Amino acid sequence: MKVNELNWFKEKVLLLPFLIFIIAFGLDKFLSLEGVHTYFSKTLSDINYIQKEELYQDLQKYLQTPQRKKVLVYFGNSRALLFNKDYIETKYPEWTLFNFSVPGGRPDYALQWAERFAQDGTRPDFVLFDHSTELYNSQASLKVDETLTNGLKVGFVLRHWKYFTTSEISTLLAKRMFYAYLYRPKLEVILARAKARETYLYPYQNLRMGFVSQLKLGQGSAITPGTHEGIMPEGLLKKSSFGDFNSYLVPFVFDDRMLYFFQGSVSEFRKIGVPMASIWVRLSLPYFELFKSQKVANEKRETVYENWLPKIEDFQRKNQLPFWNMNDDKNYNCNAFSDAGHMSPACYVDYTNYIMKRVTEK
Amino acid sequence: MLFNSIPFLFFFALVYTLYWTFPNSFRKPFLLFAGLFFYGSFNLSFLIHFILIISFNYYCLIQVSKKKQYWLKIGVIANIINLGFFKYFYFFNRLLADLTGYPFFENVPQIIHIALPLSISFYSFQAIASLVDQAREDLPIPSYLDYSLFLAFFPVLIAGPIMRRHDFFPNLENFNADKEKIYKACYFLMSGLVKKVLVADPMSTTITPIFSNPTHYDGISLFLAGICYSIQVYCDFSGLTDMARSLAYFLGFEIPENFKGPFFSLTGRELWRRWHITLSFWLRDYIYFPLGGSRLGKARTYINLIIIMTVGGFWHGADYTFICWGFYWGCILALEKVIEDKLGWDLIPQTLLFKWIKAFLIFVLFSISGLMFRSNSARSMVELFQGIVLNSKDSLSISLNFTQAWILHGGGLLGGREFFSLLKIENLERVAYMGIALIIFHHIQYFPEKWATLKRFDPYLCIVCGVISIFLLATLSHEGGEFIYYKF
């Protein structure tokens, strides 16, 4: 059977691989339906990302309100999710917080929003960026890629393709193409939830819906059920610090790309004249001790603290951007942590005051 | 841009679409362009080197066709030098360091950095075979375009199969895409990806810690690591070959098979006719036969077997471990010959039960050789074999009992009875699943005629299996690893 030019329709078998792909692609989209999704999903962190779109629309509407409060926008990560909007509005009546923090939030995610803010002319009154050291490590044995898979748009990544590795772009494309690859549904979870809906499925669905409402009410701030709720005892905290340090910071190789994204965000907000600052959020004492004692950076000649902090301070200085270093601040004393890197809710009042005091002074 | 990567998926989708859209006359140059682009995507500077090698070999081929036999020697030697320089430079340097003890040789790797060009072991052997075949058979000379495509055909550029001219050039006579080829292409792609992503990669995570620290594991775990490695290396390489064949079928080409159910083999000799077939036959045709094969007496036959298998081992990698591996197999093949020749025993059992036992024995022999093949260094290889014999679960406690018992008590207080026990291989249940998968893959390769009865369902079966495979890969895949044979 000889095949000649432009033979796609004459030789339909050539379309077979595309047909298989299209069928699989179509079936996979079925998994994205919320009713189906809840049969296998085991996470709530995706909701943080999904809800941000609505938060942005709420922010735009709020900024058009005639007698509005001043708006602080925070681009952080899981270290900045538990703020209490009501507390802020009561204690600092002129201000409110729209929290764009997401689990694993990185500077590239902040830049994606910054570009949109600048493009739409959305002008909050102050923007605060988080610097989390873990996100600046290009060689971590445990990668934080939630932003990449849940938050970044393909268009954004392709626009800044030089600053993403081939592996990152591949992961992004594959996970965006196939929900099955993104969520990895497990048969035993599906069966358990299908068999005992009252016990497993409905509570999970309620949890998701409740979390969406909480995020809406909290303007992006809400505690993710089951995370960062308690205070970890000292012994466990040391173990957690050791584990997190080795997973996220050993070996430590500074990732310059993050500064590129951060620089981009600063430039975008400068375009629309929004004042900014950056914060290095408090870490637990045993965790911070490892930052200052373990020589894991620059071929084991420097500690993470010696390697990372000067680069960040230099960046801040060059950009004339205030840098709020909670870890070296002797006046900040709340050290209750739910794990090595996450303050417990018990410290959020102090944490909020630390930020708001500086924001209101600006 | 390995076959199991997303960039390759996009690359191939584009190549496939354009290839079948272009007129016939464009297809060859387009495929060559795609092959060179694929090669260049790994390393642009090596692309120039690759083009020069192709051109040089083509010139040699023309000269050989004009009966200028010395060009055969020049061509073969030049290919060996090219391969030797890139692949064996550090090995010979280390050999000199080990033999002479001069510090200079120790420092050479810090001074001179040589990267290994993609596919050099494979294209060098193809080029040599092409020259030797020309001298032996006076074959028609292909055009420069055809010859370049022969060496730069991208489906075989990662890790073969090693093609001969008669494997490849008939494909260029008629570009066609019949249903059977496309169905085969789909099945091979599914099986290749499943073998690589769902068996080889997870198996790698089970055994990597053991090969990194063999002294920390007990003897049984070390032995099982060899079994696991056999499963991994088969699924990795056979999966890669399946993918290469699939890509070729998608483009209307048929390229040779490299595996035919090797672990169902009943003798070592049969194993090497079923494992990396194109290499085995290359070694036979271009080294074993010129050395005299089995024509120069029995003793010479045994030596020749040991020589070709050792060369085969050296081809795989520039390390003592690969040489030991090849030598080990050479000795087994020679021993089989001795048993047949001197004792007159039939190495192939007659009953099914004994056939299973014999196949398992050959598999165990392969797994033992796998320990050499996979060892990170010669020292690590020795530690592995020592460990298999000496590392009982409590060997560390026993040795401490005689010397420093207080350490034993102290350790016991901290970590209980297991404190000084050696580690055990983890995820053994995974090995069981993978073992079942291995038997199924082998059944498909060993008894293809039994599976051919399903052909009539191809239009439906291919789609259903394809969709299931995509979902299995999406939900169960681990972080993708490189192919083992990619680095050869």
Image (spheres, rainbow, N blue to C red):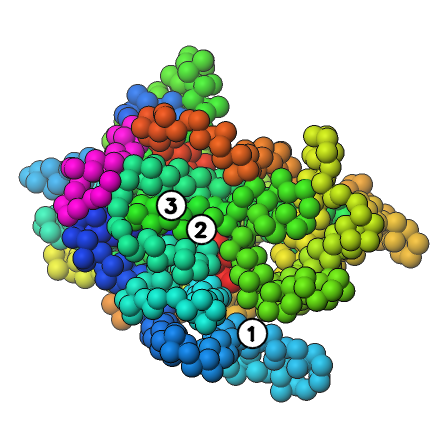
Q: Amino acid at mark 3?
A: Ser
Q: Is residue A255 left or right of residue A261?
A: right
> Residue at the spot x=36%, y=62% of the render?
B150
Residue with the mark numbered 3: B246
Q: Residue A130: x percent and y percent?
A: 33, 53
Q: Amino acid at mark 1?
A: Tyr
The furthest residue to the right:
B402
Q: Is residue B429 visible?
A: yes
- In the displayed structure, would residue A205 be above or below residue A362? above
Residue that mark 2 sits on:
B256
Q: Position of residue A192 (x, y in %)?
A: 47, 18
Of the two numbered discs 3 and 1 in the rendering, the one whose residue sits closer to the viewer: 3
Q: Residues within 10 Å of mark 2 (few under 14, many from 20)?
A: some
First to last magenta residue range: A1-27
Q: Which x, y percent locates residue B304?
A: 68, 65
Quadrant (top left/top right/bottom left/bottom right) for the N terminus of chain B? bottom left
- Mark pair 3, 1: CA separation: 32 Å
First-in-chain label (2 vs 1): 1
> Chain under label 3?
B
Q: Along the polypeptide, which appears first: circle 3 or circle 1?
A: 1
